[in-house]
Amino acid sequence: MNYQSLKPCSLLSPVPSVMVSACGPNPGDRPNIITVAWAGTVNTTPPMVSISLRRERYSYDLIASSGEFVVNLVDEKHCEALDFCGVRSGRDVDKFASLSMKPMPAEGMRYAPAVCGLPAYLSCSVRQIIPLGSHNLFLAEVVGVQVRDDLMNEDGSLHLEQAGLVCYSHGVYQRAADVLGFFGYSLAKPDVRRRRLAGYRKT
Amino acid sequence: MNYQSLKPCSLLSPVPSVMVSACGPNPGDRPNIITVAWAGTVNTTPPMVSISLRRERYSYDLIASSGEFVVNLVDEKHCEALDFCGVRSGRDVDKFASLSMKPMPAEGMRYAPAVCGLPAYLSCSVRQIIPLGSHNLFLAEVVGVQVRDDLMNEDGSLHLEQAGLVCYSHGVYQRAADVLGFFGYSLAKPDVRRRRLAGYRKT
């Protein structure tokens, strides 16, 4: 098996590609959406996520001054809107209006709205900001989570695999598709494994 | 559009699901593989990634004492091995031997090996460890990157979309499949857009 060296780079893939919505704390501040791929889960208890932002991005000050942001998971239907939010600045355009998308109040947030119509969102309260170089790392606690009704089964379980979520790998957006397995399936008994794998809806 | 509230949790999805390989600095230390989904890119310049680990995991001390780890991207062929590395402990089993996988020297690392046969790996030097609760966050600089030959085009470009990489969403592993677009495609001219989208190999 042969390998080639690349210049050290941020090749970790696939990473989430999400719409982060935020609004400043001042009257008249307009909510904005920024696309973030430098995002991750960083802690389970309490639940925490991180996002990394360049200091010069328009949303940086909205988030730093309000201490809030909302991570909106994005499905394939909204992939082009996701890209748009990553290449245009909130300084120049009202992204909600341009995309005909609506902000809605986000659970647990005072300022930051969620983006209506997307599969799910996480309301996040900033706990720490760490400068790293090109980007500053925001560590935030997840204080609210909502998911779209149609992704919930009648038994109250969440079928996120059905959402057709978008991820990002080395410059391209891809769809999270086929379910390959569930956590622990490598040690599951054959019948349990078969039954559980059959239970995931096709996307 | 109706939404339901869930208890606040780490629902960010899809997230990467990678094999992290490490070895302690002492003679006789045995290399180990741990599965990590709480991972992300945190900085572009210098390139940095984060991984979060529970303090009690076997690999925690290997990484904390050597200051090194390797992030190995995983393809669908190795998804079951990936799951196995997440549910068994290196205290009890030699995961390389159990999975018939081979460690190989990783560019820029003194102790941590890469996992031979996987699509790509990132050699990482720990810069900072931040306790967050259940997990500690390792912030690390990417000091080396290698990719498997067959993922490189003759023009020297990397076709990572062809690797069939694994991601993780709410308890299930999924394959990153169809290319939906490329960074900036929402603003690209129709002919550029068509030509570039046709250039991504089908997975």
Image (cartoon, coloured by chain):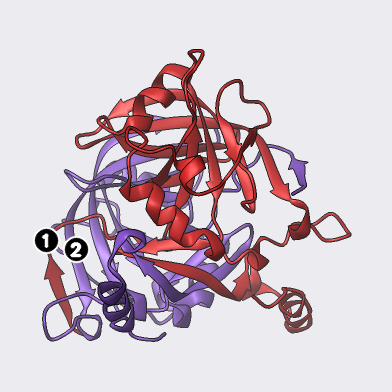
Chain colours: A purple, B red
**Image location of residue B68, percent across then percent down:** 51, 25
Nearer-the-camera pick, B104 or B202: B104
Residue B7 numbered tag: 1
Give the CA distance from mark 2 to mark 1. 7 Å
| Marker disc for residue B97 | none
**Pointer 1: residues within 10 angstroms few (<14), some, or many (20+)?**
few
Q: Secondary structure at mark 2?
A: strand
Q: Quadrant of residue B91?
A: top left
Residue B30, given in percent of the width and then of the height, sits at 48, 26
Indicate the chain on which mark 2 is placed.
A
Residues tagged 2 and 1 counted as in contact (Cβ below 8 A): yes
Depth check: give the residue in front, B105 or A64.
B105
Residue B91 appears in the rendering: yes
Q: Residue at x 56, y 74 (%)?
A: B177
Which residue occupies the foreground of this view, A116 or B196? B196
Residues at discs 2 and 1 both on one chain: no
The x and y percentages for residue B140 are: 49, 30
* Residue type indicated by callout 2: Val
Residue drawn at 61 percent across, 43 percent down: B121
Q: How many marks?
A: 2
Identify the mark at residue A145; answer none if there is no mark: 2
